[in-house]
Image (tube, grey):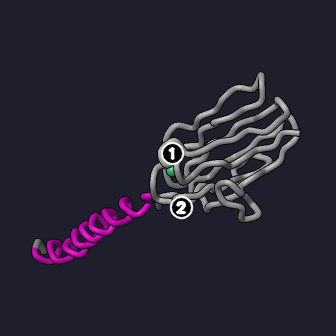
């Protein structure tokens, strides 16, 4: 009698043990995957986006550095997205009278910077880290 009860009880113990084993992986699985990085593209909220490649600001038409130029209306926003590998800045070198200078500080891959400009005129900017290469890019505010 006792022996039979013991034998019958064994599968129960095994089943409990099996449940315990499988609950380990089950509780580890809900770990959420890391969010994918946002794809390079327009800066949310910006009216126009300039890409910051290594060694070049690139406007939406492909103009680079001294040929990079975007035009916005007063009160609109220019965004920059860093799509290179090295650190860069977006730093104004000339702004219209009465307008504020801007400087992104050092930004890295996939980081963005944006400025809202309301004083009409021509704004010129460069990269303070590479001022002899990444220079002469313009924003025209109408
Ligand atoms: Cu740079």
Q: Does the magenta portion include 45?
A: no
- Give the overall secondary structure of the magenta segment: helix
Q: Position of residue 75 (x, y in %)?
A: 84, 34
Asked which secondary structure carries label 1, the reply is loop
Does 124 sit left or right of 28 as displayed? right
Instruction: Choose between 73 and 124: the one closer to the eye.
Output: 124
The part of the image, by quadrant, that contains residue 42 is bottom right
Mark 1 closeness class: few <14, some 14–19, many ≥20 residues within 10 Å: some
Specify start and end residues of the magenta stretch as a single range.
3-31
- Which quarter of the image is occupied by the N terminus? bottom left
Image quarter of the C terminus: top right
Q: Give me the C-alpha separation between circle 1 and circle 2.
A: 20 Å
Q: Name the quadrant containing residue 113.
A: top right
Q: Residue at x 86, y 35 (%)?
A: 74
Q: Position of residue 78 (x, y in %)?
A: 74, 44
The yes-or-no answer for disc 1 within 8 Å of ligand 1 is no
Q: Position of residue 57 (x, y in %)?
A: 63, 55
N-terminal label among 1 and 2: 2
The residue that disc 1 covers is 107
Nearer mark to the viewer, of 1 and 2? 1
């Amino acid at each position: 009698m006792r022996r039979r009860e013991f034998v019958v009880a064994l599968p129960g113990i095994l089943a409990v043990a099996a449940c315990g084993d499988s609950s380990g992986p089950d509780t580890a699985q809900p770990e959420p995957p890391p969010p994918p990085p946002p794809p390079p593209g327009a800066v949310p909220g910006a009216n126009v986006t300039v890409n910051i490649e290594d060694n070049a600001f690139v406007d939406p038409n492909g103009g680079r550095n001294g040929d990079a130029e975007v035009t916005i209306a007063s009160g609109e926003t220019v965004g920059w997205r860093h799509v290179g590998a090295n650190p860069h800045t977006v730093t104004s070198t000339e702004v219209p009278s009465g307008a504020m200078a801007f400087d992104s500080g050092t930004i890295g891959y996939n980081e963005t910077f944006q400025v809202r400009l309301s004083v009409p005129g021509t704004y010129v900017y460069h990269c303070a880290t590479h001022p002899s290469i990444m220079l002469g890019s313009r924003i025209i505010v109408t």
